[in-house]
Amino acid sequence: MGTEPAIWSWSAGASRRHLRPFGPRPARHALRRCGAPSGGHRPHCSRLVGTAAAEGEERGLRGRAAMAEPAREELSALAAIFCGPNEWEVLSCSDGTVFKILTKAEGLTDADVPLELVFHLPVSYPSCLPGISVHSEHLTRAQAVTVKDKLLEQAENLLSGPMVHELILWIQQNLRHILNQPETGSGSEKCTFATSVTVGDGLWMTLLHLDHMRAKAKYVKTVEKWASDLKLTGRLMFLGKIILILLQGDRNSLKEYLVLQKTSKIDVDSSGKKCKEKMMSVLFETKVQAEHKRFLAFEVKEYSSLDALQKEFETAGLMRLFSEFVLGLVK
């Protein structure tokens, strides 16, 4: 892997500053793209590989329209760099762009650790920090959260310029050191969450509607775990076939929850095969106001009548929310 100059440039006119790694030469995972021969010169990759990736790039192009030019250029570069099968996927183009990158980094045992990194770039990015979530079957939840927090700390040093590629290079070089720290030991599931990188100040709230749950017990257990891990409070509410999730917490944590809900195989389809949640809708999202009740825990509740569900919203100071969004779900 001696000389591969083209991997560091996006295009002939793009700035090289944003793809310049800092510290030592990046791990081999960052250089092995699009079948480049080991140790040989790699031509610049200007297209995505595969139908799914191409569709993701098309969606990404639409979502980039409202973003700043440096962010649009960065997204184009990332799509070109992470052009292997399933390495790049655009998940959402509303409220900025949310995309997933699959990469690897060296772990504690010298073995490669697969990492799924999800980035949310708000419309104002890179003037603000991106949202980041980290997932890996090879990491505990506490380790994944610590890796996320370290990435956000590093992102603060890169604020005002495109940073995603540099963050990926950084985690490829530093994952082993992060996992080797005592607070990220594999035996502990306790963790603290960064508070200095909240997107917006204060407590936020969102109301979600689910069409159905086939594997209800597993689904409920997973939602409870996510809420606990992300320090979210609120209610999972059942009224007949109506299923609502009301969440309160840090806005970054709410966004990470939505990513988990949309990208994890949390339910089963009609044939019993594990599947992702494709029929969730966000009914409402707002900053918690003075008249709103602060939930102290996350609870699962079954309601026997519409009046009982209405009472829950009324007690929480959310009658307007109930009238505008919940009543319409009752058939």
Image (cartoon, helix red, strand yellow):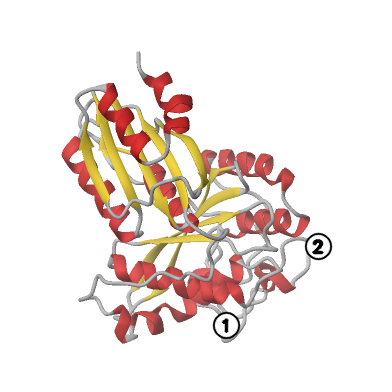
The N terminus appears in which quarter of the rendering?
Answer: bottom right
Q: Taking 123 as reference, is 139 left or right?
A: left
Q: Nearer the viewer, residue 310 or 62?
A: 310
Task: Give, as a three-letter code, the residue at label 1.
Answer: Arg
Disc 1: which residue: 25
Residue density around tag 2, few if under 14, some if 14–19, many if 20 or more, within 10 Å: few
Residue 269 appears in the figure? no
Q: Are marks 2 and 1 in contact (CB under 8 Å)?
A: no
Q: Looking at the picture, how far across and down is residue 179, in whole percent?
A: 34, 79
Spot the residue most to the top: 331
Residue 128 appears in the figure? yes
Task: Give, as a three-letter code, the residue at label 2.
Answer: Ala
Q: Is residue 113 above or below residue 137?
A: below
**Number of the label disc, if any, that sits on residue 12:** 2
Earlier sequence position, callout 2 versus callout 1: 2
| Marks 2/1: CA–CA distance | 22 Å
Q: Taking 192 as reference, is 5 left or right?
A: right
Residue 330, by quadrant, is: top left
Q: Is residue 214 above or below residue 106?
A: above
Residue 12, by quadrant, is: bottom right
Task: Identify the residue at horizontal 69%, vertical 68% (top origin).
Answer: 6
The C terminus appears in which quarter of the rendering?
Answer: top left
